[in-house]
Amino acid sequence: MRPCDSCDCDVPLDFSIAMAYQPIVDVVEESIFAHEALVRGENGEGAWEILSRVTDENRYSFDQTCRTTAIRFAAELGCKQRLSINFLPNAVYEPEACLQFTLKAAKKYDFPREKIIFEVTEHERVDSGKIVEIFRTYQTRGFLTAIDDFGEGFAGLNLLAQFQPDIIKLDMQLIRNIHQDKAKQAIIKGIVLTSELLDITVLAEGVETREEFNYLKAQGIRYMQGYFLAKPQFMQLATMEDVMKNIYDN
């Protein structure tokens, strides 16, 4: 299938991008579960500086470039774990057609598609039916799916009722000071129970302190991401040794 005729996703960007990678850690097995690819400028400029250059005219090309660049550099860096890639649902006209560049990149760089996680933030103002259509297409094609920032946005449980992703990433605002906030504790326990019943993996992002880490681990949350474990590494992959050193130092 050729790329769709509805967008300019195959038109090169007029600026260059690179990637930083932040590990997602399995705190039970003490191993790295995945690396999340985070867009950066070619000289390490922050994400917002790059995202500010995204317009209606180049968002399709930007989305496709981010996907293929994340896969390319992860492969070149020797990534053996899963790779989590954010995507812009508003940059997807036709889910099947828009996957073609991703599939080509995975094949070119010999990166298994079953190790690629596509995640979308739930605060995107997009019709939930469109997100469900995209996710179902991705699952059918062998990719993993994740809802990012769960509990922060507009879709929430309504989206979850329509589609059950492989992973839910708890919003960092729910994680902040979770060890001393009974309301947040109750909410997260409810989300964890729901996820268990639906066979969805729960991941806590934005873990920044030892107290948050200890509380979440005690509650049985196995997968975590955040500065307490490791900051994003520009054009590098953190090792579990890096993570353990960071935990010890903190």
Image (cartoon, rainbow, N blue to C red):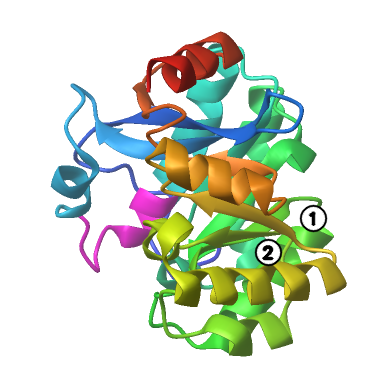
Element type at mark 2: helix
Q: Tell me what residue is drawn at x 51 percent, y 19 percent.
A: 243
**Position of 147 relative to 27 (above/below):** below
Q: Is residue 231 above or below residue 192?
A: above
In percent of width and height, residue 123 lies at 40, 75
Task: Write the start and end of the magenta stretch as one range.
Answer: 54-63
Residue under numbered circle 2: 96
Q: How many marks?
A: 2
Q: Is residue 117 above or below residue 164?
A: above
In which quadrant of the rendered view does residue 24 lie? top right
In this rendering, position of residue 12 left or right of residue 30: left
Q: Between residues 73 and 211, which one lies in front from this camera angle?
A: 211
The residue carrying mark 1 is: 141
- Of badges 1 and 2, the one in the foreground is 1
Residue 60 lies in the magenta-colored region: yes
- Label 1 crowding class (10 Å Cα cut-off): few <14, some 14-19, many 20+? some
- Distance in Å between CA atoms under marks 1 and 2: 9 Å
Q: Residue at x 24, y 43 (%)?
A: 47
Vertical relation: 213 (above or below) 151: above
Q: Nearer the viewer, residue 72 or 199?
A: 199
Q: Are marks 1 and 2 in contact (CB under 8 Å)?
A: yes
Regarding mark 1 in the picture, which secondary structure is present there?
loop
Question: What crowding class fits label 2: few (fewer than 14 Cα within 10 Å), some (14-19), or many (20 or more)?
Answer: some
Question: Label 2 is placed on what type of residue?
Answer: Glu
